[in-house]
Amino acid sequence: MNLIKFLTVVLFFGVLVGCGQQQPPEQVVNTAYQWEKAYMDRDYEAKQELLYEDGTYDIKKTAQKKDSGLKSENIRYEVYFDKELDWYYVFTTYKNPGHGTKVSNDLVIREKDSDWKIDMEASEDISKEDIEGKFDQVACINCK
């Protein structure tokens, strides 16, 4: 049910923004959510399935999985599109449900075999300030 609400919000936002901009496919934002959820849940296997290139994220392999309770509607997604590379830059911000501390991640999301995946190597090399200066924001979801 939460996924349906989330996808409805994404679709509604897309209509509000207008026709002239490159809109992120719904799965781009969903991939960002799945990554953040797997990160907070300490779900190593789920993180591995979301990677653009196998083996580029090998942290917390033995951590005990748990349900963090992280919900998509609690995450702010700022989305930028690079037409030249056909990449999406997604900046996520939210409060850790277990500790209340602020979490921010800079993600590069690329298409691979009709799926959207996290490119960890490219993600390490970006900064929000650089991206904001080079590209127009194509979506800001849960931005208050």
Image (cartoon, rainbow, N blue to C red):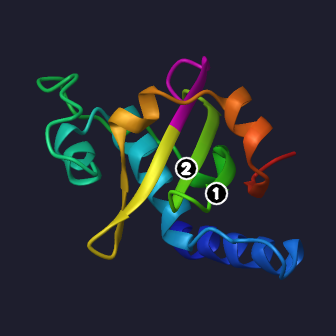
Q: Which of 45 and 135 is in front in this view?
A: 135
Tell me which corner region of the image, top left, top right, bottom left or bottom right, holds residue 113.
bottom left
The segment highlighted magenta reads: 97-106
Residue at x 18%, y 28% (from the top left corner): 58
Compared with residue 39, is residue 78 higher up or lower down, i.e. above or below? below
Percent from the top left, x then y, of residue 13? 79, 71
* Mark in front: 1 vs 2: 1
Percent from the top left, x then y, of residue 21? 79, 72
Q: Which of 87 and 26 is in front in this view?
A: 87
Asked whether residue 1 is in view, the answer is no
- What's the amino acid at mark 2? Lys
Residue at x 14%, y 27% (from the top left corner): 61
Percent from the top left, x then y, of residue 122? 41, 37
Q: Which of 59 and 53 is in front in this view?
A: 53
Q: Does the magenta stretch include residue 58?
A: no
Q: Which of 74 and 30 is in front in this view?
A: 30
Q: Is residue 99 magenta?
A: yes
